[in-house]
Amino acid sequence: MSFPVTRLRRLRKTAAIRNMIRETEVNRDDLIMPYFVIAGENVRNPIQSMPGNFQLSIELLVEEVKDLYESTGVDKILLFGIPAQKDDTGAVACEHDAIVPQAIRAIKKVLPDMMIVADVCNCEYTTHGHCGTIINGDVDNDSTLRTLAAQSVTLANAGADVIAPSDMMDGRVAAIREQLDANGFKNTPIMSYSAKFASGFYGPFRDAAESAPQFGDRSTYQMDPANSDEALREVETDLEEGADMVMVKPALSYLDVINRVKSNYNIPVVAYNVSGEFSMVKAAGSNGWIDEERLIKEILTSIKRAGADVIITYHAKEFVLSELKKGNRV
Ligand code: PBG
């Protein structure tokens, strides 16, 4: 039955009817807000390329997370650490008093119900900025698994609720699962950055986390942006190794990948709306070229519509605040 019997505009006539048939809504429960914690006291370094984001020392981070929770109800965060000292292998991140474990303990003391996702990777902790141990000029897969598993156990010990490996080594989910189980953390879930692409969209993050590789790039371990069959293989191997949730990263240039993962596997899918995606919106917004609030909502909605159950986004706080201000349910 087509025109004139069918008129799709009938269901767009009023706000009430549009609200009634809307298929996708982003809620605060879907969102995870990332933070960067840095060694030191009373440090609040603005991240130039990511307006509104800061490298925060622990006590200021605790204040910020408390404010996030009280003003928006967002109860999930992702932590990245910038240590005082780096080394060859990232072993600094495995110490009991490493920067992120300290931050986790401090947050949990004040906000025990805050869900803390701990990113597991070596690039913020190595002098060379690569995600693994370098042997003969190459990022060595199997020896890196040991540091990743040790870092995961340290984070779980500190109280991390979810372990999120972002290094893209083969076999890391199995290695981490085994060590978590062996150390009494059999109920700690793994959120694996399964399909993580070698992307130009991470540029601002590498300033924020001081983690840019000092030589070469990450294309021998992160995925080629041209591939999506391979993304499904990455997801499949991670599921076989015991991943509880899988991630696609970045989000916007990879909505098709999010959709394929969601339609092929019955598993929660996480999408990471990364730093470069955030910064482009901020740059255009501050020039008055786009309506920033409107774009943020459209972007988050599109990621969810594509199939993501969970969205990691630097827009989390401002998005919820703006929806609350408008009196919208969020
Ligand atoms: C660490 C890591 C990166 C991001 C998250 N974890 C950077 C990278 O792989 O270089 C990127 C996050 C963002 O751009 O917002 N491996």
Image (tube, rainbow, N blue to C red):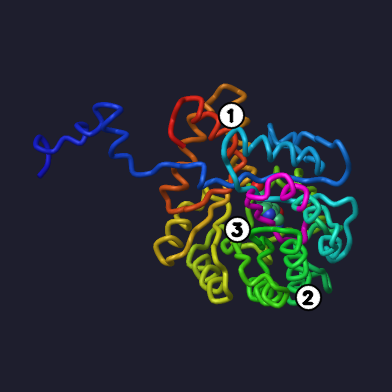
Mark 3: amino acid: Phe
User: What are the residue bounds of the magenta stretch?
Assistant: 105-123
Image check: 21 left or right of 235? left
User: In x, y percent, where is residue 98?
Assistant: 84, 57
In the depicted structure, whether residue 297 falls above or below residue 231: above
Q: Secondary structure at mark 3?
A: loop
Residue 172: say if magenta.
Answer: no
Q: Is mark 2 within 8 Å of ligand 1?
A: no
Mark 1: amino acid: Ala
Name the mark on residue 284. 1
Residue 91, picture quadrant: bottom right
Mark 2: amino acid: Ser
Q: Is mark 3 within 8 Å of ligand 1?
A: no
Q: Secondary structure at mark 2?
A: helix
User: In x, y percent, where is residue 79?
Assistant: 70, 50
Pointer 2 residue: 143
> Given contact means CB atoms under 8 Å apart, are the residues at marks 2 and 3 in contact?
no
Q: Secondary structure at mark 1?
A: helix
In the depicted structure, whether residue 87 falls above or below residue 274: below
User: In x, y percent, where is residue 99?
Assistant: 82, 53
Residue 121 or residue 74, whichever sits in front: 74
In the depicted structure, whether residue 223 falls above or below residue 324: below
